[in-house]
Image: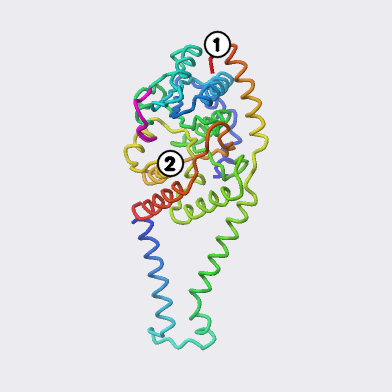
Amino acid sequence: MASMEAGVTPAKSRREPEGRPSARDKYSVLLPTYNERENLPLIVWLLVKCFSESGFNYEIIIIDDGSPDGTRDVAEQLEKIYGSDKILLRPREKKLGLGTAYIHGMKHATGNYIIIMDADLSHHPKFIPEFIRKQKESNFDIVSGTRYKGNGGVYGWDLKRKIISRGANFVTQILLRPGASDLTGSFRLYKKEVLQKLIEKCVSKGYVFQMEMIIRARQLNYTIGEVPISFVDRVYGESKLGGNEIVSFLKGLLTLFATT
Amino acid sequence: MTKLAQWLWALALLGSAWAALTVGALGLELPSPCREVLWPLPAYLLVAAGCYALGTVGYRVATFHDCEDAALELQNQIQEARADLARRGLRF
């Protein structure tokens, strides 16, 4: 990998035009939300700022699963402020899970690239231009954010959480040898047709869903690039790691271990 | 082949090689110091693997980046975003 990049560097002038925003490329950001009234305007503001500074063509698709806290009302206001060509609302009646949210969002996506991220501000849009640059570098099918490499990291985690995270990651790497360092993260860029194919193949839910996406990608010989990201744990609202998550993570890990 | 099958194959292969050598099934008469090392070898390997796992995870926990700057930057941007959105007429 390093040697490959070194080989490309001298031809920088030739590569540069690719790095510039291309008129054809469009990036659709999928934001599945549930009770994110506080965070949604902030993440949208950051996204708009990031995209208008970097000049890439974009749209933001908000898929709200019938949040009782009025997320949808805030989303409608944002649509008025930023325009319905940039902010697309595609709500659903009730909570139906992440995989189907992506399918639902993708049906309405007009971009040829899809970016998925959490709407709770733990993923910062400032990394998106890096994802795009990385993708162009080797025409990767997927670019995944990683907390475990380079300058990547976390904020707001206590020792216990760090141990669980590192331990789970270690076991996963040993058992599945996935070829990517962060399997449970959900800040990624996909080519649209690649994401479509992967979602068709994936059966699991929650954390395991993100993991399965990478494992299936390996099976289908898709290429994966990685960008170190900082993960800032939920500023508003509650974080979601409990005993139940750990059990379902282990179940999912073993299922993938036995079936792929 | 699934990852599980790969593991089982590798374990079966190593396990049978070890068993064959320790019980002398191949008709090889190993010198006794060799046999003394060979007999508890799986236990040694298990302990070594455990130490490696603990060491690696421990090191990675200790060197897990704390992104204080990122958190601070985000807090500032949140203030900025709130002010700007309020100016554009958003009712929070």
Q: Residue at x 41, y 85 (%)?
A: B24
Quadrant housing the N terminus of chain A: top right
Give the CA separation, mark 2 to mark 1. Answer: 37 Å
Q: Residue at x 61, y 56 (%)?
A: B58
Q: Where does residue A144 sit, x and y in percent of width and height?
A: 49, 38
Chain holding disc 2 = A
Residue behind mark 1: B89
Residue A175 placement (x, y as % from top left): 44, 56
* Location of mark 2 (residue): A210
The residue sitting at the left extreme is: A200
Of the pair A182 and A11, the residue shown nearer to us: A182
Q: Position of residue A158 (x, y in %)?
A: 61, 46
Locate residue A47, reporting x and y percent.
54, 23
Disc number for residue A128: none
Between A49 and A19, the one lying in front of the other is: A49
Disc 2 with disc 1 on a shared chain: no
Residues drawn in magenta: A91-100
Do the residues under discs 2 and 1 have CB atoms within 8 angstroms? no
* Mark 2 neighbour density, 10 Å: few (under 14) some (14–19) many (20 or more): many
Using a 10 Å C-alpha cutoff, classify the residue at mark 1 as few (fewer than 14 neighbours), some (14 to 19) or many (20 or more). few
Q: Is residue B59 left or right of residue A1?
A: right
The chain identifier of the residue carrying mark 1 reads B
Mark 2 lies on a secondary structure that is helix
For the residue pair B69 and A196, the one nearer the viewer reads as B69
Query: Does the magenta stretch mainly form a helix, a strand or a loop?
Result: loop
Q: Secondary structure at mark 1?
A: loop
Q: Amino acid at mark 1?
A: Gly
User: Residue A193 lies in magenta, yes or no?
Assistant: no
Q: Residue furthest front?
A: A68
The mark closer to the camera, 2 or 1, is: 1
Query: Mark 2: which amino acid?
Result: Gln
- Can the viewer see residue A25 in this picture? no
